[in-house]
Amino acid sequence: MYEMKPEYYIGIDMIDEEHKQIFKYADEAYELLHDEFTVDKYDKVDVILEKLRNYTVKHFTDEEHYMESINYKKLFTQKVQHQQFINKLDEFMDQHNKDMDDQDEQIMGILQYLTEWLVNHILHVDGQIPQG
């Protein structure tokens, strides 16, 4: 369901590969959402959120280092947006830790935010990063 579509490639291999991995985490969450055999998804949601947060921190660091290496003029804007995304993931993690009910609803909220933010960010922000 969630995959890196051709229009999401920005032409910078490292960044494209890392974006693919983030889509894999989204797909993992989607699969969990539709897993009818797992009633209590709390621990699995926790693992997915932790992996997603850790990986996006790594990805944003890599992406920002690349932008620094080419003296990208919009680096500060990118850093702000990246931090906002991490803050939102932290909110999802806090909410998840406080509320063990409505696990499917939590997963849907995470997926909706993740895909909307990621697709918009790739197409309209990362897509402007020049290839070095």
Image (tube, grey):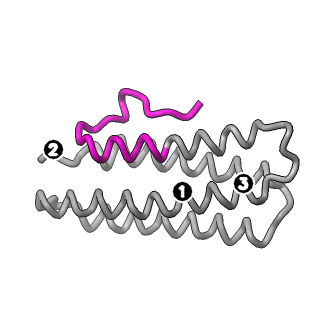
The structure residue drawn at horizontal position 86% and vertical position 38%, both measured from the top left corner, is: 37
The count of marks equals 3
**Discs 1/2, front:** 1
Residue 32 position within the rendered picture, expressed as x and y whole percent measured from the top left: 72, 43
Residue placed at 52% from the left, 41% from the top?
24
Residue type marked 2 = Gln
Residue at mark 2? 131
- The amino acid pointed to by label 3 is Lys
Q: Nearer the viewer, residue 118 or 63?
A: 63
Q: Look at the image and give the residue range highlighted in magenta.
A: 1-22
Q: Nearer the viewer, mark 1 or mark 3?
A: 3
**SS class of the residue under badge 2?**
loop
Label 3 sits on residue:
44
Q: Secondary structure at mark 1?
A: helix
Circles 3, 2 touching at the beta carbon (< 8 Å): no
Label 2 environment density (alpha carbons within 10 Å; few <14, some 14–19, many ≥20): few
The residue identified by callout 1 is 52
Q: Quadrant of the N terminus?
A: top right
**Between 41 and 114, the one nearer to me in the picture:** 41
117 sits left or right of 10 in the view: right
User: Residue flagged by tag 1: what amino acid is it?
Assistant: Leu
Give 39 or 128, whichever is nearer the viewer. Answer: 39
Give x and y (percent) for residue 122: 37, 44
Q: Position of residue 16 (x, y in %)?
A: 33, 41
- CB atoms of marks 1 and 3 within 8 Å: no
